[in-house]
């Protein structure tokens, strides 16, 4: 089960390919909801947007559709996930509107100033979260937005609650803990939304403005 916890953090090989397909199915509606929420709160649209950790690329697909004039980048540690993201969005990648980069938060600075950075279910894999969020903050333009999609520990499947910490992954017990992380990096305000019923949410969004 520890193998699976590792695979979610950086899918690779045949198992990673299957994990990616599972994420597209299991997280697809959450990713589409996230982008709908972001678009509703950014009526002026965006010109430069990055998704960190797009995995199989469902969030990228929604960003490309919702922000049809934006340049979009996807940055992921996993070659396998970049390949799935490319496969799902090949038309836009071939047209040059979507660029895929292998790397992590350190790749952001070369793309600055960025209007929107989205990261869905990536938070747990930042073992130094304050450093990661500081790099995100630096790469955003003034007024830019960081959209963080996540799940709290108590709403995660028991297998993740048990095995993620064993791999050094960081779980969060409250929106306040997430808010503190963001505000300490310098964000001016954080707005929260929840997908699904409060007692059994499908995921959460923290929208932080620089
Ligand atoms: C659990 S998956 C989530 C994928 C997708 N966002 C979703 O919601 O289905 C986490 C993804 O983030 C990537 N990842 C993990 N740590 C990362 C980091 N520091 N920088 C960029 N990508 C990262 C992994 O390779 C994987 O593709």
Image (cartoon, rainbow, N blue to C red):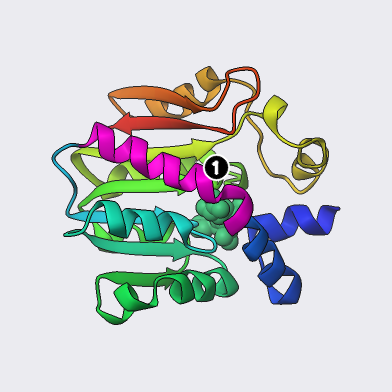
Instruction: Please state if 188 lies on the left or on the right of 16 as rendered.
Output: left
Residue labelled with disc 1: 123
With respect to residue 130, does 67 lie above or below? below
Relative to 4, residue 173 above or below = above
Q: Is residue 210 visible?
A: no
Horizontal and vertical percent for residue 191? 36, 23
Q: Position of residue 9 (x, y in %)?
A: 65, 56
The residue shown at (35%, 35%) is 37
Q: Is residue 82 visible?
A: yes
Residue farthest to the bottom, as pictured = 94
Q: Residue at x 58, y 48 (%)?
A: 27
Instruction: Give me the residue at 43% from left, 40% from top.
Output: 33
Q: Is residue 1 left or right of residue 149?
A: right
List x then y, in percent, for residue 39.
27, 40
| Left or right: 117, with 52 as reference point | left
* Residue at image location 56% in from the left, 43% down from the top: 128
Q: Which residues are magenta?
A: 24-42
SS state under label 1 = helix
How many numbered marks appear?
1
Residue 126 in picture, x, y percent from top left: 57, 46
Q: Is residue 115 magenta?
A: no
Quarter of the image for residue 92 reads bottom left
Name the magenta segment's main secondary structure.
helix
Left or right of 44 on screen, residue 30: right
Does the numbered disc 1 mark a residue whose Cβ is under 8 Å from ligand 1?
no
């Amino acid at each position: 089960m520890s193998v699976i916890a590792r695979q979610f953090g950086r899918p690779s090989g045949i198992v990673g390919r299957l994990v990616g397909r599972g994420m597209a199915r299991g997280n697809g509606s959450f990713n589409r909801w996230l982008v709908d929420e972001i678009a509703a709160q950014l009526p002026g649209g965006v010109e430069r947007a990055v998704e960190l950790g797009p995995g199989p690329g469902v969030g990228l697909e929604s960003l490309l559709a919702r922000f049809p004039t934006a340049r979009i980048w996807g940055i992921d540690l996993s070659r396998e996930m970049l390949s799935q993201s490319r496969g799902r969005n090949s038309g836009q990648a071939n047209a040059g509107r979507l660029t895929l980069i292998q790397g992590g938060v350190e790749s952001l600075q070369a793309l600055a100033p960025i209007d929107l950075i989205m990261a869905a279910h990536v938070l747990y894999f930042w073992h130094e979260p304050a450093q990661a969020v500081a790099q995100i903050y630096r790469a955003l333009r003034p007024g830019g937005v960081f959209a963080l999609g996540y799940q709290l520990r108590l709403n995660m499947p028991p297998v993740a609650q048990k095995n993620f910490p064993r791999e050094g992954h960081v779980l969060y017990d409250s929106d306040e803990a997430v808010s503190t992380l963001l505000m300490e990096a310098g964000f001016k305000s954080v707005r929260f939304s929840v997908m699904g019923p409060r007692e059994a949410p499908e995921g959460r969004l923290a929208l932080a403005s620089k």
